[in-house]
Amino acid sequence: MVKEKVVLAFSGGLDTSVCVRYLQMINKVDVITLTVDCGQNEDFEEVEIKAKTIGAIKHIYIDAREDFARNYVIPSIKANGLYQCKYPLATALARPLIAAKAIEVAAKEGANAVAHGCTGKGNDQIRFDVTMQSLNPKLNILAPIRDMNLTRDIEVKFAKEHNIPVADEAKKYSIDLNLWGRAIEGGNIEDAYQEPPEDAFQFVKFNNSDVGYMEIEFDNGIPISADGNQMQIRDLIEYVNNKAGHHGVGITDHIEDRVIGIKSREIYEAPAATSIIECHKDLEKLVLTKHELRFKQIVDEQWSWLVYSGLWQDPLRSDLDNFIDATQKRVSGRVKLKMHNGSLRVVGRESKYSLYKNDLATYTTGSTFDQTLAKGFIELWGLQTITANSIASRVDETGQSLK
């Protein structure tokens, strides 16, 4: 009898490695492993060898770095994508892309199911499931780690019993890496009071007291050059990642509210995302009106929440993209950053669309601002506030209601 086939999103880490064997043993299916390259800098030949050694009947590799950068990262830059004003959404952005590729491969390979290695505690299960069901609701979704209520210690034990190789790093932490950032979970960093050890990080350099400057140029909200050198988006991200990381910039350590209700201690390492979003936000403040900025902040927050919550396919996300794209037509110019010992701040910005006018803002002779107009403006601006306080003070004096 011919076995049914399942396409497993496969990273080669602990979770997806044991999933291959669990799917074979428990679900009695043939496993096709799929690795989608979103910039994780893995040895993909080694990943393929590992998949086939464990028992995959076929392994498929897809280079999606350009797709990820252009269709996921760039929209997030335009939206200042930060969940809870902290997390730059690196993993959250990659999951819907991986899920979409798994659906495509399942159709080509004649598989009747797709699978992932997510736990039942995290957000990734939502991102995979909702995307997969949105794109093809007829396919079954298998998730052995979640469905069998497995923990990492049980997985490590199972891997050892079945001769599945486990990297030393995977025994200490759960790592997810792509072009836009690195997420670190598990191990001793689950203690919310304990400082993450330096060996948990890859890009950020410690004990570097050098002061550094970096200039990033944007065109229609998209970063196009760094330090005067025009680059493709992938190369620019790598350049900024290395330079900002060299100065200790890019660590996010915070308590995060997961979609399913758990508060978790999350560590992210994303020098490029941290730097580029900081520059983009500052440039927007230079060229957008205060009314545009106030409303866009609401839109950005909602956009980030949708992506974090696994709702990339929701129509609202594309609706918000249309508004965001409209605001980016004037977000062109240069921003200068200063970096020192992990700190990051904008120290300069310029744009041909700048709403900042020195002859209005200056306090020196030659200012074109007529200060005498301010008195009448203040009277009108504060009219209701002043009136309300006047009425309240009369009530206090008499102790009686005005009704």
Image (spheres, grey):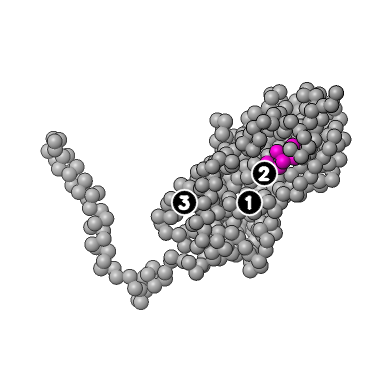
The reply to whether discs 2 and 1 touch (Cβ–Cβ < 8 Å) is yes
The reply to whether discs 3 and 2 touch (Cβ–Cβ < 8 Å) is no
- Horizontal and vertical percent position of residue 74: 61, 54
**Is disc 1 surrounded by few (<14), some (14 to 19) or many (20+) residues within 10 Å?**
few
The magenta-colored residue range is 100-106
The residue under label 3 is which amino acid type?
Answer: Lys
The answer to which quarter of the image holds residue 78 is bottom right
Q: Residue 18 colored magenta?
A: no
Q: In the image, which disc is placed on residue 296?
A: 3
Considering only order in the chain, which callout, 1 or 2, is on the residue closer to the N terminus?
A: 1
**Is disc 2 surrounded by few (<14), some (14 to 19) or many (20+) residues within 10 Å?**
many
Mark whose residue sits in front, 3 or 1: 1
Q: Residue furthest bottom?
A: 366
Q: Identify the residue at image location x=42%, y=71%.
A: 358
In the rendered view, does 379 fall on the left or right side of 24?
left
Q: Identify the residue at image location x=39%, y=72%.
A: 359
Report how far apart the C-alphas of labels 3 and 1 lie in the structure: 20 Å
The answer to which quarter of the image holds residue 136 is top right
The reply to whether discs 3 and 1 touch (Cβ–Cβ < 8 Å) is no
**Between residues 200 and 130, which one lies in front from this camera angle?**
130
Residue named by callout 2: 97
Residue named by callout 1: 71
Relative to residue 238, is residue 193 depicted above or below?
above
Q: In the image, which disc is placed on residue 381?
A: none
Where does the N terminus fall, quadrant-wise?
top right
The residue under label 2 is which amino acid type?
Answer: Leu
- Horizontal and vertical percent position of residue 289: 42, 59
Mark whose residue sits in front, 3 or 2: 2
Q: Identify the residue at image location x=66%, y=66%.
A: 230
Q: What secondary structure do most residues of the magenta stretch adopt?
A: helix
- Horizontal and vertical percent position of residue 301: 50, 45
